[in-house]
Amino acid sequence: SVEQAGELPQQRPDPRRTSVIAGSRVDILDAMEDLEARKPDLIQALVLRDVSQLEYAEIAAQLNLPLGTVKSRIHEARKQVRQTLGESYT
């Protein structure tokens, strides 16, 4: 395994790409914080689905909401975040 590790090429992240990715993440986090401040009921479902990757039924059970309400909140939250981010993220 030592020989194999020595054979691996040194890969360094491209700073141009890394900064774009990092900037995008900051923008998304800012948009989510904005949504949380304006509509906290929407952000819970969005985070559980898109960050924690729970199934809709699991989210409904955890939030004690009907499945349709969970789906509606996630849809509306995504729409709100997209609007905050602007057209450069679509």
Image (cartoon, helix red, strand yellow):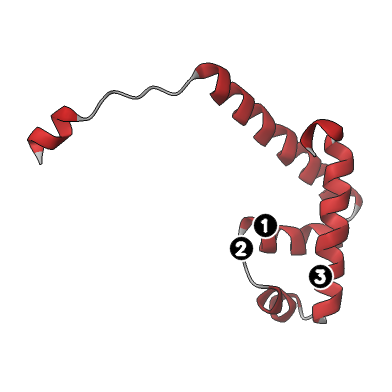
Q: Quadrant of the N terminus?
A: top left
Q: Nearer the viewer, residue 11 or 25?
A: 11
**Do residues under tags 2 and 3 come within 8 Å of each other at their CB atoms?**
no
Which corner quadrant of the image does residue 24 belong to? top right
Chain-order first, disc 3 or disc 1: 1
Residue 79, above or below 89: below
Residue underneath mark 3: 71
Residue 40 appears in the rendering: no
Give the percent coordinates (x, y) of residue 86: 86, 34
Classify 10 Å Cα crowding around label 3: few (below 14), some (14-19), many (20 and above).
Answer: some
Residue underneath mark 1: 50
Classify 10 Å Cα crowding around label 2: few (below 14), some (14-19), many (20 and above).
Answer: few
Give the percent coordinates (x, y) of residue 81: 83, 46
Q: Residue at x 34, y 25 (%)?
A: 11
Residue 89 bears which disc, if any?
none
Q: Nearer the viewer, residue 37 or 35?
A: 35
Classify 10 Å Cα crowding around label 1: few (below 14), some (14-19), many (20 and above).
Answer: few
- How far apart are the two marked residues, 3 and 1, measured between alpha carbons? 12 Å
Residue underneath mark 2: 53
Q: Residue at x 86, y 34 (%)?
A: 87
Label 3: element kind: helix
